[in-house]
Amino acid sequence: MVNLLEKIENNRAKNGSVLIFTILLLATMLLLSSYFISFSLTGSRMSESQIYAAKSYYLAETGIQEAIFKLKNDDDWRNAFETMPTIDDPTCSSWSISPYKRNQALFENGSYEVGIENLGCAKAEITSTSTIIFSSGKIAQRVVKTKVFKAIGNPVSDFNIFTGGSSENIYIKSTDPLNIYNGSLFSNNNINIKYWSKVNVDNKALAGNQINISSYSELNAITCSSDICEPGCATSTECPPAEVSMPPLDFDFYLQAAESSDCSFLRIDGKTNCLFTLEEFEKLMWQNYPELSLPEDVVTYIRGDINIRAGQILTVNGVLIAERDINMGEDYCWTSSEYPFLRCGSSRVMVNRPGLPEENKSAGILARRKITTGSWLGFEDKAMDIDGLIYAGDEIKISSVGAFIEIHGGIASRKFRLSSMWNGIDIYLDPDVIIDTFRDPEYSPVITIDHWEEEY
């Protein structure tokens, strides 16, 4: 009986231990199951969050890409973005583009809002904020910002001498030396260097057709044309260069500027502006012989030709424009009905750019048709000392000048001829004065991304 009771007690103890172990096992399994379920749900939520994060990023990026597209192709956006600097607003602070929002973009529950901040002339920061609403009502957002700009320039501003005629040339004959500093030569057709000429170019000589050099002449430059392609001209736009047309010069702007400029202290005819007829300007030079200095920071516009001759020393402190031709040093003598009736001698022309470089002032000698020189241009050691642009809508012909020529700026015309220049000519490229004098700079067609950042 005692043994039976002991066996029963032992069985009860064993059964109790099994029960406790079973309960502990079940509790452990339940805990593990809860953990795995929680882990799976967390992973699912994380996966969903990653999916929505990726979607929100691409949605915000879509807003950036649409804004860049509109800056290139939407007339309202492009015209605002490409606002040109002016004297009154040199930083282009006036332009603005309204923000906009696009719903159901890419996804039914997605949207983005795009804002454009004006940072200057053809400079902006684009901010795109995307929003995606989860099925649970939660929101995923991403902010993408990028700074973009367009470069401003002018196709002429890279070249000391530029000819834009489709079938015209740069022709250099009997010239030693022609020195091109800090820039290049460009002809849409041929560059011809003949008869004991020496041309030194710091950069490149670019020709849309051919570069022809006679056996007694010399060209020291990287040459790029259809018949000569040196290692420095390995790109498709330089060998041969892409055709570049002659950019227009805004003569109407300068006409209006001359009408509002003040030349009253020079005139004795009762007029005050700087708009002269051919006869009025001839009389002005005769009465201010031998040295005529035009007022600083004005535009002097001549309706007709300009003839600088017979010992006249002309200083232009800004812009001098001829509605037709400019002739310098072609006549040694000059007769007039006014005393002393006859004057003779060699002439000189100087151009000064007014103001400080950062003031973007125009300067130069500009002709709608032709600019020509003769053998009587050259007084003492210099014939021309130009800080500005020399421009002719048709032809520039510099020939047989009797003294040294120095130009800080550039030369632009449909065709260009340089001959019998044994005293030398130095041309230092100044792209700023070229751009400022053309008054119609162009923005690059390419929008450059300057900076890109993301925010959650």
Image: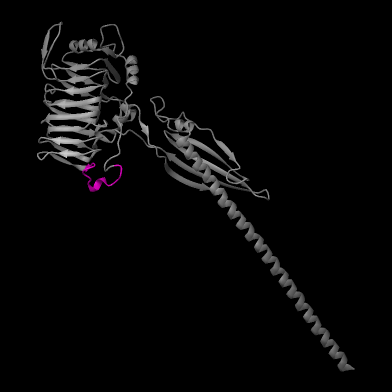
In front of the other: 246 or 270: 246
Residue 456 in view, yes or no: no
Question: In the image shown, does 174 or 98 lie closer to the viewer?
Answer: 174
In the foreground, 287 or 215: 215
Q: Find residue 142 and report its horizontal and vertical position in percent.
A: 56, 47
Residue farthest toward the right in the current orientation of the protein: 1
Quadrant of the rendered image containing residue 199: top left
Q: Position of residue 455 (x, y in %)?
A: 53, 47
Name the colouring of the figure.
Answer: one colour
* Image: magenta residue range: 223-237
137 is higher (above) or lower (below) than 333: below
Residue 21 position within the rendered picture, expressed as x and y whole percent measured from the top left = 75, 78
Number of numbered discs overlaid on the protein picture: 0
Residue at (43% x, 43% y) in the render: 449
Q: Quadrant of the N terminus?
A: bottom right
Is 236 colored magenta in this rendering? yes
- Left or right: residue 84 compared with residue 182: right
Residue 283: horizontal and vertical position, in percent? 20, 10
For residue 268, say whether it is visible. Answer: yes
Q: Is residue 273 magenta?
A: no
**At 68% from the left edge and 64% from the top edge, which residue is drawn?**
37
Query: Mostly what secondary structure, the magenta segment?
Result: loop
The quarter of the displayed image where residue 428 is located: top left
Residue situated furthest front in the rendering = 167
Res 309 → quadrant: top left
**Above or below for 138 versus 351:** below
Position above or below: 200 against 37: above
Residue at left offset 25%, top offset 22%: 369
Q: Is residue 451 above or below residue 315?
A: below
